[in-house]
């Protein structure tokens, strides 16, 4: 017995390790911009070519989302930039040794540069730049009337816009925070004069802006690297190593331009790049529109169905308690109401450290959003029962549970059902945001469409979503016939 | 049957009822009085729907509890029927712990007693007229064969012809079944038709108690005459 134990233990550990190794594919994450998605796709395909099972969770979100996902082990690899690492994530000095030390403490390894740097640049409309003779960032100080549109990330960071403004003594007040892709369109449309861009943006070639020289050397270098967990197996590390130094700035701009301007899907771009540079032949799945929409529909229905189902299971009892207990009512209605006021985007991001990425956290966020209409309408429905009927129930000697089951819930059902319907219709819309944290659904084509400025792709998500909302309305009319007593739906007879 | 000892009930600072009285078995007592005199409060105290601030209420010699309540039938204005249930389901709900067959037989017998056509039993309350709803309410109160029947303005929402019809039906039922009946009304016609005894209330207290004829013949207080004359005067004018 005693001799057998260490052997059994070792065997169990070995089996467990083998199981872990075999069961779970390496998950590569990427941020929600084209370059990151392409790099993520490249890494995933190189892993596969190296015989490592790998999966790409594309366009998960911003820096914080990916970093949290990596450090909590929800993903294993993602492309990052050295400047982002030291300035935003680690808040350390920007030399490589310092960064690597700080990463090691968090069990994260950084690859050498992939071959290009993608630092911030400021881009001005070329006609504005020509007219005002703008060539350097310093030149902006003389023109306070210029309208700036910066990414939220640049605006929020202490070393971003506030530091830039201080360094260059910029007087500008009209600074708007907006999505990077929208900023380019604002610049093109003339509603913005200066925006921030990345050195490898495809749009640089498309819109021909004037890039303003960083004459005071303000912006940090942003070398593209891969971050991965130190638990990554050697085979995977070796596969990723092949990408080091393999992508030049020109390569990256070309790939970005193909994605953005030619609407070539990232997997295709990555496959072409790998074939050209490594001689790897990679298949690219080709899904027809119908098949794509069907898959998105299934994902979306799962999101809406499960979240509304969860909200009913949670909201109905909460509503009943709130209707019966005066003291708890304010607390319950207040807190569900408060949760409703959290912007849905913010709520989704809050979910990441708690529940990770994917369908799970999106469901939790959607449940939270669906609660208020259900709870409120349950309370209103039970409250709305006429006092004579309450008295009748008491006179018949109905117990608390009987009263609820036989009288209160059936009478409140039309109101409760209306609440569930509202929740479901809202959920159909809100679930499109789930794509931001990798939950799929109709939001996926919308998100990609916005990123690629591809209207048909946006409609591929938006139209089915609108249609689904209509169907939900119709569905509930049918459900009402089933669960609401005919006695509550008939018109009163003419009295004698 | 009902014994109320030094019973007192207030709503905030407002005295609702303060009485000490006994209601005899097998008799029909009508609680009369203007709005707000406490007659409905008195009835709901007897049903145990509200608890007195002071005093005790006995039913058939024992304190009023949930078991005792099952031996009392209760009817309110418009029947108090649940709109999501059919007439039959409304009645059966009161007898939910009895065997199905027994309840069905009982409902058939009761429909005959209150003269409700059987096909109407499968209708929902909103598909019935006011008088029909009141008959179903009466059936529901009677289905457990209670010893006492409490009625709160049962005919309040009915037109005079239906009201007279139901008054006579109720009188017949009370006499047939020999129930103790306590009925709240402000209508002298109800009292004249049904009451063995009348209790006239004002501001929560008993003003006079006795057969209606006695209240008319020997009023104990000017209020008694005033209350009775207020309802007789319009017709008396026509005679003159």
Image (cartoon, coloured by chain):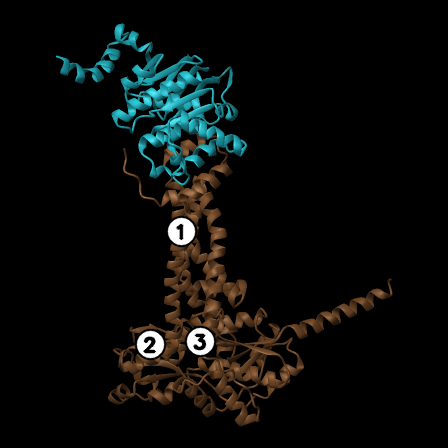
Pointer 1 residue: A480
Spatial CA distance of label 3 from label 2 is 38 Å
Measured along the vertical axis of the image, is residue A72 above or below residue A307? below
Q: Earlier in the sequence, mark 3 or mark 1?
A: 3
Q: Is there a contact, CB below 8 Å, between mark 3 and mark 1?
A: no
| Rendering coords of residue A485 (x, y %) | 41, 45
Residue A385 at what x, y percent from top left? 38, 39
> Between marks 3 and 1, how big is the CA–CA gap?
32 Å
How many marks can you see? Answer: 3
Q: Which residue is mark 3?
A: A290
Q: Secondary structure at mark 1?
A: helix
- The answer to whether mark 3 and mark 2 are in CB contact below 8 A is no
Q: Where on the picture, by quarter, is residue B198?
A: top left
Q: The C terminus of chain A appears in which quarter of the rendering?
A: top left
The relative height of residue A380 versus residue B143 in the rendered view (above or below) is below
Residue closest to the far top: B218
Badge 2 element: strand
Q: In this rendering, would B48 be left or right of A135?
A: right
Residue occupying the point 47% across, 37% down: A403
Q: Nearer the viewer, mark 2 or mark 1?
A: 1
**Can residue B179 be seen by looking at this rendering?**
no
Disc on res. A149: 2
């Amino acid at each position: 017995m005693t001799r057998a134990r260490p052997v059994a233990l070792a065997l169990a550990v070995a089996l467990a390790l083998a199981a872990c190794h075999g069961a779970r594919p390496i998950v590569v994450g990427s941020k929600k911009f084209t370059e990151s998605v392409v790099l993520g796709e490249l890494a995933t395909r190189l892993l596969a070519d190296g015989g490592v099972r790998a999966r790409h969770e594309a366009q998960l979100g911003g820096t914080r989302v990916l970093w949290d996902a990596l450090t909590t082990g929800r993903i294993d690899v993602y492309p990052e930039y050295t400047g982002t690492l030291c300035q935003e994530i680690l808040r350390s000095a920007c030399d490589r040794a310092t960064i690597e030390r700080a990463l090691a403490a968090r069990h994260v390894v950084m690859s050498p540069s992939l071959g290009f740097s993608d630092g911030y640049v400021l881009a001005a409309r070329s006609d504005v730049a020509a007219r005002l003779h703008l060539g350097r960032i310093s030149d902006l100080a003389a023109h306070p009337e210029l309208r700036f549109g910066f990414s939220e990330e640049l605006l929020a960071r202490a070393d971003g816009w506030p530091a830039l403004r201080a360094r260059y003594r910029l007087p500008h007040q009209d600074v708007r925070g907006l999505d990077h892709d929208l900023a380019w369109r604002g610049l093109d449309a003339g509603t913005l004069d200066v925006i921030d861009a990345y050195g490898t943006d495809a749009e640089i070639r498309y819109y021909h802006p004037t890039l303003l020289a960083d004459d005071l050397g303000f912006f940090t270098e942003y070398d593209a690297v891969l971050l991965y967990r130190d638990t990554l197996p050697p085979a995977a590390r070796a596969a990723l190593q092949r990408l080091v130094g393999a992508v030049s700035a020109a390569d990256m701009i070309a790939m970005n331009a193909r994605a953005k301007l030619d609407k070539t899907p990232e997997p295709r771009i990555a496959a072409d790049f790998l074939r050209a540079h490594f001689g790897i032949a990679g298949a690219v799945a080709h899904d027809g529109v119908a098949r794509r929409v069907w898959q998105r529909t299934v994902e979306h229905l799962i999101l809406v169905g499960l979240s509304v189902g969860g909200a009913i299971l949670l909201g109905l009892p909460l509503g009943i308690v709130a209707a019966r207990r005066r003291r708890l009512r304010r607390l319950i209605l207040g807190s569900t109401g408060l949760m409703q006021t959290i912007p849905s985007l913010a709520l989704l991001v809050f979910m990441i450290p708690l529940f990770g990425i994917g369908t799970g956290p999106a469901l939790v966020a959607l449940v939270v959003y669906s609660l208020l209409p259900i709870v409120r309408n349950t309370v209103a429905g039970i409250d709305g029962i006429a006092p004579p009927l309450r008295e009748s129930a008491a006179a018949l000697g109905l117990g608390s549970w009987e009263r609820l089951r036989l009288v209160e819930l059936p009478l409140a059902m039309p109101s409760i059902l209306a609440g569930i319907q509202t929740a479901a219709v809202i959920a159909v819309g809100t679930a499109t945001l789930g794509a931001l944290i990798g939950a799929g659904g109709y939001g996926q084509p919308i998100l990609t469409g916005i990123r690629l400025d591809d209207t048909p792709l946006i409609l591929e998500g938006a139209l089915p979503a609108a249609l689904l909302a209509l169907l939900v309305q119709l569905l509930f009319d049918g459900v009402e016939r089933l669960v609401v007593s005919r006695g509550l739906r008939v018109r009163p007879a003419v009295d004698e | 049957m009902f014994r109320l000892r030094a019973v007192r009930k207030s709503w905030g600072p407002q005295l609702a009822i303060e009485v000490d009285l006994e209601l005899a078995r097998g008799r029909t007592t009508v609680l009369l009085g203007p709005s707000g005199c406490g007659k409905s409060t008195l009835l709901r105290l007897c049903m145990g729907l509200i608890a007195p601030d002071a005093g005790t209420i006995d039913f058939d010699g024992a304190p009023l509890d949930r078991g005792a309540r099952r031996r009392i039938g209760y009817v309110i204005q418009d029947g108090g029927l649940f709109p999501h249930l059919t007439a039959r389901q409304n009645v059966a709900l009161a007898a939910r712990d009895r065997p199905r067959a027994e309840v069905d037989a009982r409902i058939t017998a009761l429909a005959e007693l209150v003269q409700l056509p059987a096909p109407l039993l499968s209708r929902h309350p909103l598909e019935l007229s006011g008088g029909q709803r009141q008959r179903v309410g009466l059936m529901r109160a009677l289905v457990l064969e209670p010893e006492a029947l409490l009625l709160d303005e049962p005919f309040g929402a009915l037109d005079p012809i239906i009201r007279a019809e139901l008054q006579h039906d109720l009188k017949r039922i009370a006499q047939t079944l020999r129930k103790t009946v306590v009925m709240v009304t402000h209508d002298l016609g109800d009292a004249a038709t049904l009451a063995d005894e009348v209790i006239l209330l004002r501001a929560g207290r008993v003003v006079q108690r006795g057969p209606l004829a006695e209240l008319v013949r020997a009023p104990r207080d000017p209020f008694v005459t005033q209350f009775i004359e207020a309802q007789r005067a319009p017709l008396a004018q026509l005679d003159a």
